[in-house]
Amino acid sequence: MIYQILSDDGHPMDSHAELDTSGITLLSRGGSTAKGNVTNAEYGPALRLILRRIASARLPFDRAWVDSLDVQRLPIEQRIILSNGELDADGSSAFTLMSKRMKLVGQGAGRKGGNSTKKIRIQFGADVKLLELESALRTIQVREDVRSAERLPAEIFRVVTAEHVWNAVEKLRQPNFRHPYGPSIDFDLITNEEERFPPKAVFGLAATEALGYEILPRHFSGGLGTPCFRILESAGFTIVAKGEESRPIDVPESPDDRSWTEGKPRLIAHLRRERASGLAQAKKDWFVRTHGKLFCERCGMDPVAIYDGAHGAACIEVHHQAVQVEEMADGHRTRLEDLQCLCANCHRVVHRLLKLALNKQAESARVGP
Ligand SMILES: [Zn+2]
Ligand SMILES: [Zn+2]
């Protein structure tokens, strides 16, 4: 099966490999740069990553050889470019050795200079389970049926959760993150930090993670009422027409919130963070995936055991557990790890304690040491 290597920041690189339980075959770089039709253009960076990941996952590396068609007549011993024991911890000196040796394989009288982007085989000394290999190397499968398809049926996108959408937004926040989606023409997705991202890019990246193979722009359509927009909105994000202002979340919402936050702008900031687009839904999805169900992290209350499944989850809220209230200052970006799932009762109590702590702080500041 053919796989693509994911870069450290999670984008599928232009480099393809075949994986099996006994090793990896990395496909050669091909085509001409001048004509702009290069295949596997990221061969070099991908090979570096593969070597580093083999080393750090302690996969049973045995040796590597050149496997291109023109040298397959030679015995493997004459095509070896890395031997057992030559793979270093971060793979960088192995990479240099392999590149140098690759050029020499098959060279002899009358043959022109070789390149260092050939098809190679990396062989293990013992079998590795395919699943283990896929996760150690950080690859995604290339589904030929998907690659060649135009639109994909909308049902397959049902596996996209709020957590996938949240992760996609985090990827797009990296300044140099590369993806196959262009800028948006008609709509913007607005994040809790008031950033604007193309909704199709967010959804495509979320679907790529959810499905485990690359989803391309032509595989689905965006726009009002499409499954793409519905899933983004139910993940807690707002989508507005380009140029349209976003409506800020109205906090404090309830009379209880109002009395709690009175005179305390920091507590309003706290509420704003907890109710920000996408966060609460993503946290709950993550929590269920990790623990198998939702429950209160403070008192252990399992709402689904008490109420019924569909509505019980409504009593779990998401609390921002920054230890120091100072951390809530502007510019602090909320992460899923900063959040805690609490039942509505515990959440209320925790908020009271927070206000008490703030009051004490203010008092001691007034009195002085
Ligand atoms: Zn509780
Ligand atoms: Zn809270």
Image: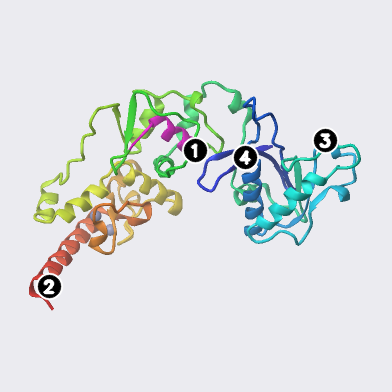
Q: Which residue is mark 4?
A: 42
Q: CA distance from mark 4 to mark 1?
A: 13 Å
Q: What is the number of callouts on the image?
A: 4
- Label whose residue precedes the other's in the sequence (4 or 1): 4
- Label whose residue precedes the other's in the sequence (3 or 2): 3
Residue at the spot 15% in from the left edge and 44% down from the top edge: 253
Residue at the spot 44% in from the left edge and 23% down from the top edge: 221
Asked whether the residues under the numbered discs 1 and 3 touch, taking CB atoms below 8 Å apart as contact, a structural biologist would say: no
The answer to whether residue 198 is magenta is yes
Which secondary structure, mark 2?
A: helix
Characterize the magenta stretch by its predominant secondary structure: helix
Identity of the residue furthest to the bottom in this view: 369
The spot of residue 78 in percent (x, y) is 88, 49
Q: CA distance from mark 3 to mark 2?
A: 78 Å
- Disc 4 marks a residue whose amino acid type is Glu
The spot of residue 365 in percent (x, y) is 12, 71
Q: Where does the N terminus fall, quadrant-wise?
A: top right
Q: Which residues are magenta?
A: 196-209
Q: Which residue is mark 2?
A: 364
In this rendering, position of residue 56 left or right of residue 66: left
Crowding around mark 1 (Cα neighbors within 10 Å: few <14, some 14 to 19, many 20+) is some
Q: Which residue is mark 3?
A: 69
Q: Which residue is mark 1?
A: 178
Which secondary structure, mark 1?
A: loop
- Label whose residue precedes the other's in the sequence (4 or 2): 4
Asked whether the residues under the numbered discs 3 and 4 touch, taking CB atoms below 8 Å apart as contact, a structural biologist would say: no
In this rendering, position of residue 254 left or right of residue 168: left
Disc 2 beta carbon < 8 A from ligand 2? no
- Label whose residue precedes the other's in the sequence (1 or 3): 3
